[in-house]
Image (cartoon, rainbow, N blue to C red):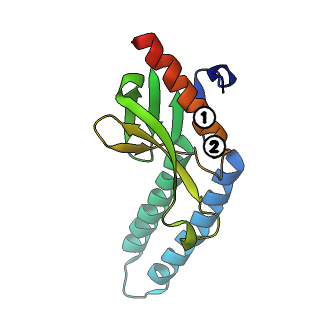
Amino acid sequence: MSAESLRLPHEYRVATARIGGLAFTILLLSFGALLPLWSDKEFAPSTKGFGSLLILGLCLLVVVAAARAATVVTAEGVKVRGMVRRRHLAWSEIREFRKEPNPNAHMGRGAPEFFTYAHRHDGRKVQLPYVDDKHVVVDREVARLLALLEEHRGAAG
């Protein structure tokens, strides 16, 4: 497989339709969390308002973080932007890319069966967001990433 089939830079991101579905689901769940707060007569209106803002703010934070998460492949390496953490892996740090089964795939419908990881030379691995079987054809993308790794490893060495 030629690395040419993957133009650089290339981003793996969640589809906009999926973010809309996530936002809708979180909105419903937040109303479920707010119902006991608002139905309890013991809480002051200011406490109810503050609690509501806190819950809705956290829900909004989750939706925005999921939308911003991405795997970006560049000529310099792979940038991983998770929901909380950002990492940059230079090509020289990466030993290989590998598809691995999701141990929690059985927990919910819609969960990916396979994730893709960048395995580093120090033995650690980094999950690549949205390089899973719900967003891409994993085997094809792993082959492309391995071809890019070989190409950039050869250029550096």
Whether residue 126 is visible to the viewer of this picture, yes or no, is yes
Kind of residue indicated by mark 2: Asp
CA distance for labels 2 and 1: 6 Å
As drawn, which residue projects farthest toward the bottom?
Answer: 41
| Residue at image point 58% right, 22% down | 9
Closer to the camera, 47 or 33? Answer: 33
**In the image, which disc is placed on residue 139?**
2
Question: Left or right: 123 with respect to 16?
Answer: left
Snapshot quadrant of residue 147: top right
Closer to the camera, 3 or 76? Answer: 3
Query: In this figure, which residue is indicated by the disc labeled 1?
Result: 143
| Residue at image point 44% right, 80% down | 37
Q: Secondary structure at mark 2?
A: helix
Closer to the camera, 150 or 112? Answer: 150
Snapshot quadrant of residue 24: bottom right
Q: How many marks?
A: 2
Q: Which percent across, then down, holds residue 148?
A: 55, 24
**In the image, which disc is placed on residue 20?**
none
Q: Is residue 18 above or below residue 32?
A: above
As drawn, which residue projects farthest toward the left?
Answer: 122
Please report contact status of discs 2 and 1: CB closer than 8 Å, yes or no. yes
| Residue at image point 38% right, 35% down | 87
Question: Left or right: 22 with respect to 154?
Answer: right
Instruction: Please rate how many residues cluster around mark 1, counting C-alpha atoms within 10 Å: few if below 14, some from 14 to 19, many from 20.
Output: some
Q: Which percent across, then down, holds residue 60?
A: 51, 54
Kind of residue indicated by mark 1: Ala
Q: Secondary structure at mark 1?
A: helix
